[in-house]
Image (spheres, rainbow, N blue to C red):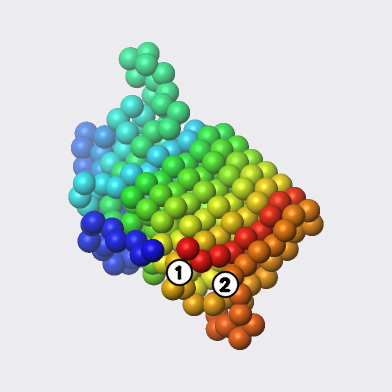
C-alpha cells in the first residue's frame, strides 16, 4: 500500500522558519519570544523546530507555509542558529482551563522534534520528518512522515501505534506497551523494541526482503519478510521480553 498524500511535499531541506513580527517578535539576531498567535513561515534550508510541552500535543497539517499554534495556550519561541524552539505553556485564559492536547499545525517538508510529558502525542496527515518522545502516554501516527526522512517514535509507559507511516529509517520504542507499525512504503531499516508488550511491523506487499533479527523471552516470533541473502542495508531488529514479535507484508 503506497501512501499518496494529497499535498505537494516540499523538499526536506526546505524548512520553516523566519519569525513573523506581531506585537512582540523574535530579534532577528539571535533569541527572542513571541505569543502563540504568531506563526513561522518556510524560509531557509536546514532549519529545525523543537516543540516542548508538559502536556500532550496534536500535530496537524498547516493550510500553507506557516507553523500555527493553538490560541488557547502561550507559545514562547527562541532561536539559536538554524534551530527554533517552541515551549508551550497553558495560559488558562478566561477560566476555561488548560487544553490537555493543544494543536500545532505543521507545513509540509518540516523537521519536527517533540518532547511531551504525562500525555500522548497524536500526529495526523503531517508530511514531515518526525522525532516524537513522550512519557506516560501513547504516540499515535496516521498518514504521516516522509519517505526520504527518518522517523523516531518513543514513549515509556504507553504504546506506539502508526498507520500509513512513511520513513526511510524507522525507530520505535517503549517499555510498558505495544509497538505496532504499518508502513505505507518500505523503510530501509526498522528498529522496534519494548519490554512488556508485543512488537508488530507491517511493510507493503511488494517490499523487498530484510535481514530480520527477532527476540522475545515469553512469546512467539513470526516473519515472512526475512531472507538471509537480503541487502545488508535492509534490516529489521525487533525485540521484547514479554510478548509476541511479528514482521510481515500486507
3D distance between C-alphas at marks 1 and 2: 10 Å
Q: Is residue 14 rendered to the left or right of residue 176?
A: left
Task: Point out the image quarter for the N terminus.
Answer: bottom left
Q: As drawn, which residue projects farthest toward the bottom? A: 229
* Callout 1 crowding tier (Cα within 10 Å): few <14, some 14–19, many ≥20: some
Read off the residue under disc 1. Answer: 205
Residue 111 horizontal/vertical position (percent): 38, 58
Residue 213 can be seen, yes or no: yes
Q: Which residue corresponds to the image point at 28% horizontal and 52% vertical from the top-left?
A: 107
Q: Which mark is residue 225?
A: 2
Q: Is residue 161 rendered to the left or right of residue 24?
A: right
Residue 227 found in image quarter: bottom right
Q: Which mark is residue 60?
A: none
**Which type of secondary structure does the marked residue at label 1 adopt?**
loop
Q: Which residue corresponds to the image point at 23% horizontal and 57% vertical from the top-left?
A: 7
Looking at the image, is 105 positioned above or below residue 71? below
Q: As drawn, which residue projects farthest toward the right? A: 217
Residue 205 horizontal/vertical position (percent): 45, 69
Residue 162 horizontal/vertical position (percent): 48, 52
Q: Which residue corresponds to the image point at 72% horizontal and 58% vertical from the top-left?
A: 220
Amino acid at each position: 500500500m503506497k501512501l499518496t498524500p494529497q499535498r505537494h511535499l516540499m523538499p526536506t531541506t526546505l524548512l520553516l522558519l523566519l519569525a513573523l513580527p506581531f506585537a512582540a517578535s523574535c530579534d532577528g539576531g539571535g533569541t527572542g519570544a513571541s505569543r502563540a498567535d504568531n506563526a513561522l513561515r518556510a524560509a531557509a534550508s536546514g532549519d529545525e523546530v523543537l516543540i516542548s510541552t508538559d502536556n500532550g500535543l496534536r500535530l496537524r497539517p498547516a493550510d500553507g507555509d506557516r507553523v500555527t499554534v493553538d490560541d488557547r495556550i502561550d507559545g514562547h519561541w527562541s532561536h539559536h542558529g538554524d534551530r527554533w524552539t517552541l515551549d508551550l505553556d497553558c495560559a488558562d485564559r478566561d477560566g476555561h482551563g488548560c487544553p490537555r492536547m493543544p494543536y500545532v499545525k505543521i507545513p509540509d517538508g518540516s523537521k519536527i522534534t517533540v518532547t511531551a510529558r504525562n500525555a500522548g502525542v497524536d500526529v495526523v496527515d503531517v508530511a514531515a520528518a518526525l522525532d516524537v518522545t513522550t512519557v506516560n502516554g501513547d504516540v499515535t501516527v496516521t498518514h504521516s512522515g516522509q519517505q526520504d526522512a527518518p522517523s523516531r517514535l518513543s514513549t515509556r509507559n504507553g504504546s506506539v501505534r502508526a498507520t500509513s507511516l512513511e520513513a526511510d529509517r524507522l525507530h520505535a520504542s517503549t517499555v510498558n506497551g505495544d509497538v505496532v507499525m504499518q508502513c505505507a512504503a518500505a523503510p530501509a531499516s526498522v528498529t522496534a523494541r519494548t519490554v512488556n508488550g508485543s512488537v508488530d511491523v507491517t511493510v507493503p506487499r511488494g517490499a523487498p526482503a530484510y535481514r530480520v533479527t527477532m527476540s522475545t523471552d515469553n512469546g512467539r516470533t513470526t516473519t515472512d519478510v526475512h531472507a538471509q541473502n537480503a541487502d545488508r542495508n535492509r534490516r529489521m531488529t525487533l525485540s521484547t521480553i514479554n510478548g509476541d514479535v511479528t514482521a510481515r507484508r500486507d
